[in-house]
Amino acid sequence: MFANLSDRLTASFKQLRGKGRLSEADIDATVSEIRRALLEADVALPVVRAFAANVRERAKSAEVSAALNPGQQVIKIVNAELVEILGGEARDLRFAKNPPTVIMLAGLQGAGKTTLAGKLGRWLRDQGHTPLLVAADLQRPNAVTQLQVVGERAGVPVWAPEPGNGVGDPVGVARSGIQHAHDKQYSVVVVDTAGRLGVDAEMMQQAADIRDAVSPDEILFVLDAMIGQDAVTTANAFAEGVGFSGVVLTKLDGDARGGAALSVRGVTGKPVMFASTGEKLTDFERFHADRMASRILDMGDILTLIEQAERTFDAAQAEEMAAKISGEGDFTLQDFLGQLQQLKKMGSMKKMLGMLPGMGQMREQLENFDEREVDRVEAIVHSMTPAERVDPRILNGSRRQRIARGSGTTVTEVNSLMERFDQAKTMMRQMARSGGKGGVPGMGM
Ligand code: GDP
């Protein structure tokens, strides 16, 4: 899911690498790339238009941060816009004051309603509710049996019409299901309804009749993320025909281009509340716009990292550091110490490293990272004289021995720090040349 979109977006950001600042032309080129990427991912045109316009406007306005380079700035803006079109903060299910809470599922045949009923039932059960599933899909042969199988697997009871009885009266089944829930004190009722392959008037009427009979607290529109551009027409038809309060996206595990996910909130104004990501009961999660955006941008939790950096380094510090680094090599151990201390202010090094994308593969090294290393480095630099900090070339054997003694470390550790300091200096010069502002080592996008 989203793999193509991710690749395209990431590629458009890479073009900004090494740029010192964003020109109008850079912004226009990047926004066109983003626009193309979204259209190719089947995102609805009005949503693409609004997205592109917002990104352009924000990139051109004065939201320029001294702590971020142009690539990072654009990523930050695109991310914020993605979160916005994906729906911002997740909304919780609304539970009725007087149980049972009634949740009705609506959507096309094959969208994944019956499967979802089981997942939702189990999820509710795990949250301490006592759910009941109601089989009001009497259209599709086997729909009732399918719900019974799913319910059994989920450990959630199912209310279904007696065989040969109530066939053809989904409204009656829904109503008696709610009555049964009242009688037996179930706290939540999930009503599965019929869908057709396409939108049709009769189906809509049936869904509307069920709605009127059970007065749902939530109507969840179940949308197959694989149906591409059709998602918008279908969503609009259901919004008009039945109305709904939230959306569930299914089949997000497929290799669909993802347009439905990105369009549905913008087109219907209703939040995406859950995501279904496979056929198993547990392939189900609350939908979080920010995590989805992060997934699309393939960036681990680098945004949190960027935000922490912004909070930690003010503009003046970033400028001063950038000047030092790009200046003729007068980046000293004193500056190095300052940077380390600022990084430390951002929080645990291990946690910060863990937020970098791709870190999943380096879990073991990460586990072995010793936070005290930073303290040792600090102690070593503190044990140096001001002259030594400015010009480490004067560090001969006896000076190194004195420093090791003073800092409670060994000469080997002092030597190793000096080596790493040289490497850091080289790396920072390279970053400065490639346009990084130097505030955050290792983040030179
Ligand atoms: P309904 O007609 O809306 O009730 O749809 P079903 O629940 O019967 O689902 C239709 C098909 O899609 C079934 O084969 C399900 O196993 C499958 N399905 C449902 N949700 C998902 C999902 O999130 N991922 C995948 N890969 N398949 C799903």
Image (cartoon, rainbow, N blue to C red):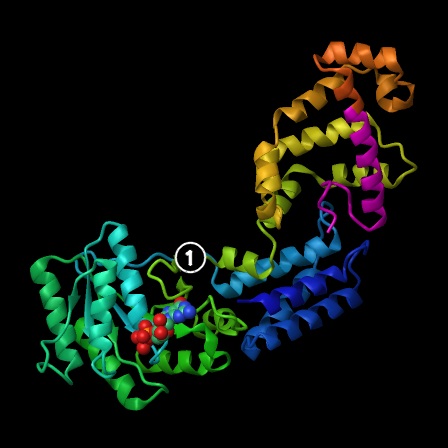
- The amino acid type, in three-letter code, at marker 1 is Ala
| Residue 172 found in image quarter | bottom left
Ligand 1 lies under 8 Å from the Cβ of mark 1: no
* Residue at 72 percent of width and 43 percent of height: 442
Q: Residue 94: where, in percent of width, then height?
A: 29, 59
Ligand 1 occupies quarter: bottom left
Start-end of magenta stretch: 416-445
| Helix, strand or loop for disc 1 | loop
In the image, 359 versus 258, the foreground residue is 359
Looking at the image, residue 268 sits to the left or right of residue 355; the answer is: left
Looking at the image, residue 116 sits to the left or right of residue 314; the answer is: left
Residue 167, visible in the rendered structure: yes
* Residue at 41 percent of width and 78 percent of height: 235
Was residue 434 drawn as part of the magenta stretch in this picture? yes
| Residue 362 found in image quarter | top right
Q: Is residue 305 above or below residue 347?
A: below
In the image, 131 versus 64, the foreground residue is 131
